[in-house]
Amino acid sequence: MRELFFKLFEMSHFDTGITITPFSPAHIVYLILILGGIIGTWFGFRHKPEQKKAKLLRFLAYALVVSYLSDFFMHEFVYGGLNTDKLPFHICTVLCPLMAIAQFHRKGDKIKEPVAVLSVLAPMMYLCYPASIGDGEPWCYQAVQTMFYHGVLMAWGILSISLGAVRPNIRNIWKSGLLLVGITLWAKLGNTLMEHNWFFLEEDAFYIGLVENNIIPKWVLMIANPLVFFLAVLGVYGVCYAVRKASRKDTPVAA
């Protein structure tokens, strides 16, 4: 049985040599499937009753949590042991428990807006440049689980906003800033205790050696990384307000 599981979860089943590298055909196909699924779901649910929209978001939340937790049971067969990179210290991985709290906890509404906004941005950045997905074939477990997780997280964030469960208000942008500070400090704690590179605070996200080659001091990443995300958050709010303004213009005025 153990050998069967190693066979099922191996990186290559057909020795095709096809892998997911940034902007490769396999990467583009995944992007089309994920974005197409989100857009199609929005069209299918935009006129549904609020109750059905809420059920959809709960389903996505359950799917994300199950995908994240069940993955740890597969690490032995995929990586030969625990993959510490998937512990909840990266922004994408820590958003799973935060999303669950925002979606299911009775006081989750207090953090739902910043969590939803970051759930749009963080997985989108990863999906646009999946540098750490590994060298397995696009249909192997590692690739499918990684793309599925980030795709569902982004879907929950986008649909939470576009279906009206979350209505971003620029006055609340400080919550996203505060959350980013918390995530940065949380990731730094993990890096210090376990000597890792969560939230890319030890070396740049593209691993081009900005810290290693003494181009920038490491402490700069503690400021630059959350600042970049916060600027992107501003962009999300700008898009939301632009869409609302355009929607009001397209709405016919009653006689």
Image (spheres, helix red, strand yellow):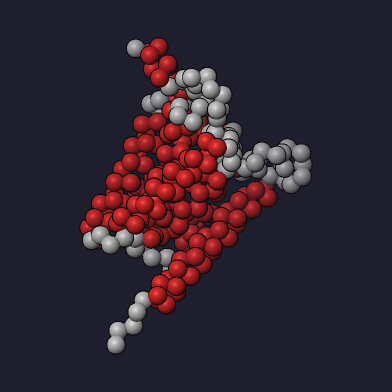
Which residue is painted at 25% across and 51% down in the image?
55
Which residue is painted at 77% across and 42% down in the image?
214
Q: Could you tell me which quadrant the N terminus lies in? A: top left
Taking depth in this image into account, of 251 and 63 the one nearest to the observer is 251
Query: Residue 204: where, in percent of width, then height?
Result: 65, 43
- Outermost residue toward the bottom? 255
Query: Residue 180: where, in percent of width, then height?
Result: 52, 54
Label total for image: 0
Taking depth in this image into account, of 156 and 90 the one nearest to the observer is 156
- Outermost residue toward the right? 214
Q: Quadrant of residue 66?
A: top left
Q: Is residue 227 left or right of residue 167?
A: right
Q: Is residue 168 left or right of residue 189?
A: left
Query: Residue 113: where, in percent of width, then height?
Result: 41, 60
Which residue is painted at 24% across and 55% down in the image?
52
Which residue is painted at 56% across and 24% down in the image?
17
Visible residue check, residue 190: no
Visible residue check, residue 36: yes
Q: Is residue 206 left or right of residue 56?
A: right
Q: Could you tell me which quadrant the C terminus lies in? A: bottom left
Residue 218 sits above or below residue 240 on the image: above
Query: Residue 142: where, in percent of width, then height?
Result: 46, 29
